[in-house]
Image (spheres, rainbow, N blue to C red):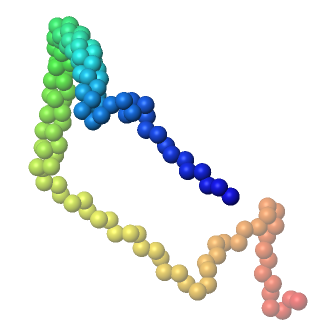
């Protein structure tokens, strides 16, 4: 049984460059992207600032309408707060507490009303001697 030793070779650009050369190449790549990306970001920021300036010149009419609505809401809120403060300052007399109604005492035997009969019938008391 033979074991094969597998070696991993470094990438090709390491094979041809030493430490100083590699640093210079990486620095060149960084500056290339920096010079390419920086102007793109600058132009993008400039366009957005111009767009915001245009919106700001058109906004005073909208701002005035919003401010007037806000002022009206503040006035209503102030009036409501004054009313609540007036109500809180008034002394309130406690309402009289009504006692619960008393129930009549119940007797052991329930009361019965007068006996009713069907129309045409009468109750006859039996006499002690009849039977």
Q: Residue at x 37, y 34 (%)?
A: 14
Q: Relative to 36, say whether 115 is above or below.
A: below
Q: Would residue 59 be seen by someone viewing this image from the given angle?
A: no
On the image, which quarter does residue 67 sit in?
top left
Check the image and name the residue furthest to the bottom: 129
Q: Relative to 100, say whether 8 is above or below.
A: above
**How far across and how far down the image is residue 3, in percent?**
61, 55
On the image, which quarter does residue 86 sit in?
top left
**How far across and how far down the image is residue 15, in percent?**
39, 33
- Across the whole image, how many numbered discs are drawn on residues? 0
Question: Which quadrant of the rendered structure holds the C terminus?
Answer: bottom right
* Left or right: 57, with 128 as reference point: left
Q: Residue at x 27, y 15 (%)?
A: 36
| Of 67 and 1, the residue lying toward us | 1
On the image, which quarter does residue 130 sit in?
bottom right
Q: Residue at x 15, y 49 (%)?
A: 88
Q: Residue at x 55, y 50 (%)?
A: 5
Q: Relative to 68, say whether 12 is above or below.
A: below
| Of 10 and 126, the residue lying toward us | 10
Q: Relative to 33, say whether 80 is above or below.
A: below
| Of 13 and 56, the residue lying toward us | 13
Question: Which quadrant of the rendered structure holds the N terminus?
Answer: bottom right
**How far across and how far down the image is residue 61, in percent?**
18, 9
Check the image and name the residue furthest to the right: 131
| Of 131 and 54, the residue lying toward us | 54
Q: Would residue 98 be seen by someone viewing this image from the given angle?
A: yes
**How far across and how far down the image is residue 40, in percent?**
27, 14
């Amino acid at each position: 049984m033979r074991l094969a030793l597998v070696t991993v070779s470094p990438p090709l650009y390491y094979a041809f460059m030493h430490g100083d050369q590699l640093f210079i190449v990486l620095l060149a790549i960084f500056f290339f992207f920096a010079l390419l990306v920086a102007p793109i970001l600058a132009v993008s920021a400039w366009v957005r600032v111009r767009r915001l300036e245009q919106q700001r010149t058109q906004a005073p009419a909208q701002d005035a309408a919003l401010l007037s609505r806000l002022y009206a809401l503040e006035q209503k809120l102030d009036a409501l707060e004054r009313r609540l403060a007036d109500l809180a300052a008034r002394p309130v007399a406690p309402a009289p507490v009504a006692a619960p109604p008393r129930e009549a005492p119940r007797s052991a035997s329930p009361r019965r009303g007068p006996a009713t009969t069907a129309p045409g019938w009468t109750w006859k008391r039996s006499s002690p001697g009849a039977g």
